[in-house]
């Protein structure tokens, strides 16, 4: 197991004083021996073994301050002449804090609401560009963000242009269709208009460790979908009914907000496939191909602006110097301890998903 943090340790029997160290990486091996790599003082590195008790103290990632407009492109007239605000949607869409050791993550739904609130209250912001790079996420979380966008447009009248970057599938596209216009990066991927529910059968994995379930329950279906046993036919039918309902909701939303789509277009994407941006234009899933600068120009045109100042709505203490700047939204220990067995952390997952999921570990949420 690897970890990071600070500690007070006594190193070896020959060392009489206590050293204050900051762990870079720690690997537990056996009961008493702890090989370590640490930093002591000004860039001095120490490697060795020590025995005995030790204490590790870690702190959560500091408060990065409120959402503020950070200028990422200057305009001729400054803020007084009007601004375009970039609101980013990056990574997995869940209504949970991405917490963990020294986590830099936060709740994507809460962050989105906060950014829209800043854009609504700032009179200098005349239009918004949604910069989307996400595989999607939870059904409920995607629906919440889509509703927040609807309320923003209704309450402010400010135009919104969605820019689909590398990836905008599932719940990310569910949100994007709520914009006035959708611009897709030519090499991007979108689609995955459907729903799924994660299920992993860990019966054989647990039996390897002589672990067997012995559940006491009040009704046959109280534990439906349990990872401790194979899913039953009646459980599968009930899950299928819920998933089909979510998929129909998604398809109905797309049909309603993308009136240019024909019956043939809707039939072509009914199976939940992903499509390249060029094909998405043909199917009327997006309005045109272009890059982020093109989306900004579209927002300017719809706002009656020209060469406007562009701001990115981010936390006050984050380094933001470009229209492509991204806030960290992944717990740091995900890179320190990347191994995840699908299904083990299922309690941390959104059960029903609008998500393109080629890798099952994509939905791993670090436990608090």
Image (cartoon, rainbow, N blue to C red):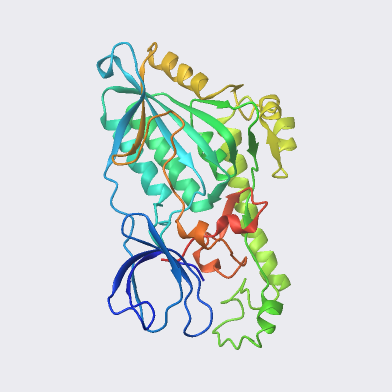
Q: Position of residue 208 (x, y in %)?
A: 69, 83
User: Which quadrant of the structure image shows residue 240?
Assistant: bottom right
Residue 185 place in picture, x, y as percent: 60, 27
Q: Position of residue 17 (x, y in %)?
A: 27, 76
Residue 204 versus residue 196: which sits nearer the camera? Answer: 204
Q: Quadrant of the C terminus?
A: bottom left
Is residue 1 left or right of 313 when viewed as pictured? right
* 77 in relation to 281, above or below: above
Q: Nearer the viewer, residue 78 or 10?
A: 10
Q: Quadrant of residue 168?
A: top right
Q: Is residue 295 above or below residue 16?
A: above
125 sits to left or right of 176: left
Q: Is residue 257 above or below residue 212?
A: above
Nearer-the-camera pick, 202 or 33: 33
| Residue at 70 percent of width and 36 percent of height | 275
Q: Is residue 39 above or below residue 71?
A: below
- Give percent across and percent down for residue 319: 35, 37
Residue displayed at 65% across by 36% down: 189
Camera-side residue of 188 and 140: 188
Q: Residue furthest front?
A: 14
Q: Residue at x 42, y 82 (%)?
A: 51
Q: Tag count in the figure?
A: 0
* Residue appearing at x 28%, y 51% in the figure: 63
Would you say 78 lies left or right of 172 here? left
């Amino acid at each position: 197991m690897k970890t990071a943090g600070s500690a007070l340790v006594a190193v070896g029997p020959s060392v009489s004083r206590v050293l204050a160290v900051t762990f870079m990486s720690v690997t537990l091996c056996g009961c008493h021996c702890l090989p370590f790599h640490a930093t002591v003082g000004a860039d001095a590195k120490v490697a060795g073994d020590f025995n005995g008790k030790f204490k590790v103290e870690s702190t959560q990632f500091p408060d990065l301050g409120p959402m503020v407009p950070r200028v990422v492109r200057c305009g001729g007239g400054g803020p007084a002449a009007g601004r375009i605000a970039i609101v980013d949607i990056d990574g997995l869409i869940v209504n949970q804090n991405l917490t963990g050791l020294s986590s830099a993550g936060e709740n994507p739904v809460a962050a989105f609401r906060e950014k829209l609130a800043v854009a609504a209250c700032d009179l200098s912001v005349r239009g918004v560009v949604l910069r989307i790079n996400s595989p999607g996420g939870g059904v409920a979380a995607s629906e919440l963000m889509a509703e927040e966008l609807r309320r923003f447009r209704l309450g402010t009248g400010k135009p919104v242009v969605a820019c689909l970057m590398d990836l905008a599938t599932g719940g990310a596209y569910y949100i994007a269709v709520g914009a006035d216009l959708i611009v897709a990066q030519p090499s991007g991927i979108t689609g995955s208009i459907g729903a799924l529910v994660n299920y992993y059968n860990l019966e054989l994995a647990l039996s390897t460790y002589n672990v067997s379930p012995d559940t006491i329950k009040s009704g046959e279906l109280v534990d439906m979908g349990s990872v401790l046993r194979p899913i039953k036919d009646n459980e599968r039918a009930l899950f299928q009914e819920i998933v089909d309902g979510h998929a129909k909701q998604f398809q109905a939303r797309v049909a309603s907000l993308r009136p240019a789509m024909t019956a043939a277009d809707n039939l072509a994407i009914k199976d939940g496939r992903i499509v390249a941006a060029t094909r998405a234009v043909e199917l009327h899933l997006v309005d045109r191909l272009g890059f982020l600068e093109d989306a900004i120009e579209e927002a300017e045109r719809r706002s009656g602006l020209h060469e406007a100042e562009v701001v990115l709505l981010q936390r006050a203490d984050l380094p933001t110097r470009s229209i492509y700047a991204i806030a960290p939204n992944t717990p740091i220990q995900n890179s320190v301890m990347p191994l995840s067995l699908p299904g083990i952390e299922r309690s941390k997952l959104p059960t029903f998903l609008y998500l393109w999921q080629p890798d099952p570990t994509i939905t791993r949420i670090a436990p608090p």
